[in-house]
Each structure stands twice: as C-alpha cells, then as structure tokens.
Image (cartoon, helix red, strand yellow):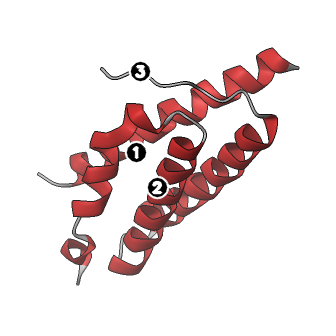
Amino acid sequence: MKTIKTIKTIMILCMLLTVPIAFVSCEEEETTEVSGNDACLDQLEILADILYEKTLVFSNNATPSTCSAVRTAALNLINAAEDCGYGYLYQEQAQFWIDYDCSIFND
C-alpha cells in the first residue's frame, strides 16, 4: 500500500511540472526532509484531482475565469506539496503561476 502512495505522489508531482508547460504552449538543489505522512499524501492527491478537473474545464473553455481557477488550484497544490516537504522542487513552478496573466484569454 505504501508503494502505491509513493507512485501516486510521484505522478502528482510530475503533473505539477507539466501543467505550466501546457499553458506556455498556449502562448507564444537544495535538500529537505520529505514527510511520509499518509494524510499529507492523501491531501496532495485530492488537490491534484482538483487541479486536473480545473485543467479539463479550462481546456474546453479558455477564459480568464477558468484560467484563474487552474492557477489557484496549481498554487494550492504547490503550497500543500511544500507543507509536505516536496515544495522545494517546485519553486520555479510556483513563480510561474504567481506571475501568470490570465487576462490573455479575454475575448
């Protein structure tokens, strides 16, 4: 069961890395202790599911509102990952989402 949680966590973290790439395509080492807390991993999984859902909605209807929902979901996942000890890997991704301008999707 622990192996499944680890695989899910790795998949969630990989998804976090690929979402900014999808947004960019629409437009032209520090160490830390990693928590093995199952509740933390469960929370990351829930937030990753939310990010996935928001990304699907955005891909079907790219508006400032749906973009903002993806941005918020991504930042929530990054913040939770940091709280779980994984955030050090995603400083650049967090900055991408903080700086991302969803107004480019105005009609």
Mark toward the viewer: 3 or 2: 3
Q: Is mark 3 on a helix, strand or loop?
A: loop
In the image, which disc is placed on residue 31?
A: 3
Query: How far apart are the alpha carbons under marks 3 and 2?
Result: 22 Å
The three-letter code of the residue at mark 2 reads Ala
Q: Residue placed at 19% from the left, 72% from the top?
A: 104
Q: Is mark 1 on a helix, strand or loop?
A: helix
Residue 1 placement: quadrant: top right
Precedes in sequence: disc 2 or disc 1: 1
Q: Residue placed at 40% from the left, 31% from the top?
A: 89
Precedes in sequence: disc 3 or disc 1: 1
Classify the position of the C terminus by image quarter: bottom left
Is 96 in front, or is 25? Answer: 96
Q: Let me know if residue 21 appears in the view.
A: no
Q: What residue did someone put label 2 on?
A: 74
Query: How far apart are the alpha carbons under marks 3 and 1?
Result: 24 Å
Residue 22 placement: quadrant: top left
Q: Relative to 28, is 9 above or below?
A: above
Contact? badges 2 and 1 (CB < 8 Å): yes
Within 10 Å of the Cα at label 1, are there few (<14), some (14-19), or many (20+) other Cα atoms?
A: some
Query: How far apart are the alpha carbons under marks 2 and 1?
Result: 8 Å
The three-letter code of the residue at mark 3 reads Thr
Q: Let me know if residue 98 appears in the view.
A: yes
In the image, which disc is placed on residue 19?
A: 1
Q: What element carries label 2?
A: helix
The three-letter code of the residue at mark 1 reads Val
Mark toward the viewer: 2 or 1: 2
Precedes in sequence: disc 3 or disc 2: 3
